[in-house]
Image: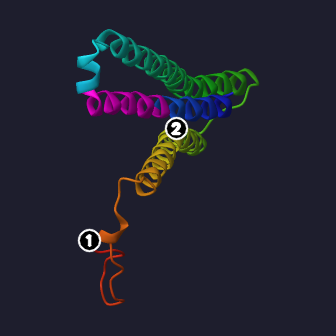
Amino acid sequence: MIAFLYRAWSLYEEKWMEATDNRLQVIKNVFDNIRFIKQNAMENIYAKIVSDQRSKESGFMLINCLIGITMDLLTSVLDPASVVVFMLFYFKSGEELDIANATILLRICYILHDAFHWVPACITDFADLKIGIKRLSKFLRSEEIDLKNFETPDESSPYAIEI
């Protein structure tokens, strides 16, 4: 179940970032064409378009936050609950627990809890990196960049390109 939530969280975070990109693209288009919009009294139309884009973005943000809260709750509650259930069954069976075994058991639970705690952050970072690389790639492929201004430096230079 946790793995499913991690995957859903990553998916919705990517959709959230794409919705943010779309909203920012609409706003950029509005700024680029502000004179036309003002001359033709189209402010309300574009305000609705931006508002709709923001609503989509907010929806993905809300779902992403709810999934994140659910994962935090599960990872913070399930570990102690599993230790309590294990201890109940262990003591009900008539066994005794010495301090060495208890320490090892608690250390294993802590390591597992720490691993589950950092997995969502790693998935989020990878999703952010993927989106950032897509944005850079899109920017570098845009027609607005004049490639004549970029030169390939000689091999002694520490830089990949020079402007």
* Residue topped by disc 1: 163
Q: Quadrant of residue 104?
A: top right
Nearer to the camera, 115 or 155: 155
| Residue type at the position of mark 2 | Pro
| Residue type at the position of mark 1 | Ile
Q: Position of residue 24 (x, y in %)?
A: 36, 31
Q: Is residue 45 above or below residue 108?
A: above
Q: Is residue 45 magenta?
A: no
Q: Position of residue 19 (x, y in %)?
A: 47, 28
Residue at 31% over, 81% down: 158
Q: Nearer the viewer, mark 1 or mark 2?
A: 1
Residue at 67% over, 21% down: 88
In 3D space, how far apart are the residues under numbered discs 1 and 2 (Cα atoms)? 39 Å
Q: Position of residue 57 (x, y in %)?
A: 45, 22
* Residue topped by disc 2: 120
Residue at 36% over, 53% down: 144
Quadrant, the C terminus? bottom left
Q: Position of residue 61 (x, y in %)?
A: 45, 22
Quadrant, the N terminus? top right
Extent of the magenta region: 17-34
The kind of secondary structure element at disc 1 is: loop
Determine the main secondary structure of the stretch shown in magenta: helix
